[in-house]
Amino acid sequence: MRLDDLRLSDLLKFPPDGGVIRFADRRALIVDADALGTLRHELVDLLGFGAARAILTRMGFAHGWHTAGANRELPFTDPQDWRRAGGRFHRLQGQVDFRPVPPEDRDPLALAEALWPDSYEAEQHLQLLGRSTEPVCWTLCGFASGYLSRAFGSRDDPVFCLESRCVGKGDAVCRMVARRASEWGPEAAHLADALNHRHLDHVLDFAAEALRSTEAKLERSRRALARAVPDTDPSGCIAFSEPMKRALGLARQAAAVDVPVLIEGESGAGKERLARVVHDESPRAAGPFVPVNAGAIAGTLLESELFGHKRGAFTGADRDRVGLFEAASGGTLFLDEMGELPLDVQVKLLRVLQEGEVRRLGENVARSIDARIVAATNRDLEAAIAAGRFRDDLFYRLAVVRIRVAPLRERKDDILPLARHFLGLARERTRKRLHDIAPAAANRLLAYGWPGNVRELQNAILRAAVVAEHGTLEETDLPEELRGTAVPRRAAATAPGTFATLEEVERAHVERVLDAHEGHRAAAAKALGISPATLYRKLRRFHPK
Ligand SMILES: [Zn+2]
């Protein structure tokens, strides 16, 4: 690395949403210059000009001294460059600009000399204390003195920097002259006083030691804090919104008691996630968690899946099979899409739950079961009961505890934390250095309705991450349906003033639902309330070969 190539972006490390900022690997703060000006004002008022100058000079000196020490470790192409880096650092820190004075214009005794345009300190002094009769860039001179003392000075002969001109006393630009202490006359007496090196040695050694141990302590407490306040709940659930916090709290309470739980919520809202919490935080946590999607398996097959079968029980049953009720013994059986369960299977399930035992198809032996049932549905089961499609006795047996998972659009507080979480996962999958979500993109995420809920959000973030070109996920990286108006995708292509045809709207809707279900046709067909065959016919019509 060349000194001139040193950029602020190489030295600054910061989490995009703030927290601990590091500059050249040390903790840095963003404090506006006015606050420092106020401090200066207070010091001058309280202690007088001389004492305030001494304090601020010493503060600058300590800063310069430490910065030089840290810079020695930077990988400069010319190993001596760290000695000359002080001015550039001043500039990168935004304190003052820096222009070296060519040797022919220099004070013959000077070790270095520079013009300092844009001194924050002169600016603040003029604003709050008015024009001075003496130079006022005390922290800047202190910093330069500390830096150059470490780079070029010795214990007995440090380097002192004074201003020969200063904006604070009415000059056009500040000008700094650095000489060895032994080369200065009485004009540097106040520096010699303030920077009495025996005193300073002690201060600096003490400060360096204290700094090291404080850093180590800070690092330890930071790690402890990160454990104590993670982004997500220990269960892995992201619950920043009130509805989700309530659902999670209820799941925890239910976990402790061995009763059936019914989780209700739209597709993709995170019902299985919550079912896992019920399992993981229950006394059955060490046992198996067995999920089964009642909507994805056809009638007879579902029975044999759930209850098992004996060899020869039906055509194709070429060996004995253990059902999921038995497989979940000692653990939890998660019955997803409960509302899709055919009535005849509902009857059999009810009997199993009432009797606490299961018979494999084609077998007469009753086997007692020890599985907790957590059921989930995206249908309104009470409406299904009213319509005669769901048995009320089964419903009451399953719904001892009912937990509702709100759709994502009703818990906007979870959207960005979830999006960041998924961005982290996408970062690993795409191996891209994606750190943050641009504000415009975040607004889009918040404004969108998320019909496919958390699953759709995860897919959208992954798709955006795939096309993103920079470290930040931009609005333009988001899938089209999020960026546009509320008009569905295909219909949006229609010219203004004309209307999309019903078929265009239907096609856009079908494609969105398919997207939300990751292209899973059976699941998309369920969500659309049509049979997979109907969906297949529609897709054939939309995409004729
Ligand atoms: Zn100045």
Image (tube, grey):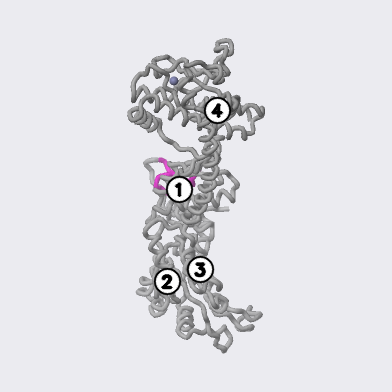
Q: CA distance from mark 3 to mark 4?
A: 57 Å
- Nearer to the camera, 402 or 41: 41
- Residue at 63% x, 81% y is 320
Relative image position of residue 169 (x, y in whole percent) = 39, 17
Q: Quadrant of the N terminus?
A: top right
Residue 147, numbered circle: 4
- Residue at 51% x, 85% y is 357
Residue under pointer 1: 481
Amino acid residing under circle 4: Tyr
Q: Is residue 283 left or right of residue 401?
A: right
Above or below 244: residue 171: above
Which mark lies nearer to you, 3 or 4? 4
Residue lying furthest front: 198
Q: CA distance from mark 2 to mark 1?
A: 38 Å
Residue 122, numbered circle: none
- Nearer to the camera, 6 or 107: 107
Under tag 4, what secondary structure? helix
Residue under pointer 2: 254
Relative image position of residue 192 (x, y in whole percent) = 49, 23
Which mark lies nearer to you, 3 or 1? 3
The quadrant holding residue 323 is bottom right
Quick check: is the Cβ at mark 3 less than 8 Å away from ligand 1?
no
Residue 524 in view: no
Above or below 89: residue 278: below
Residue under pointer 3: 280
Q: Earlier in the sequence, mark 2 or mark 1?
A: 2
The quadrant holding residue 11 is top right
Amino acid residing under circle 3: Asp
Span of residues in magenta: 477-495
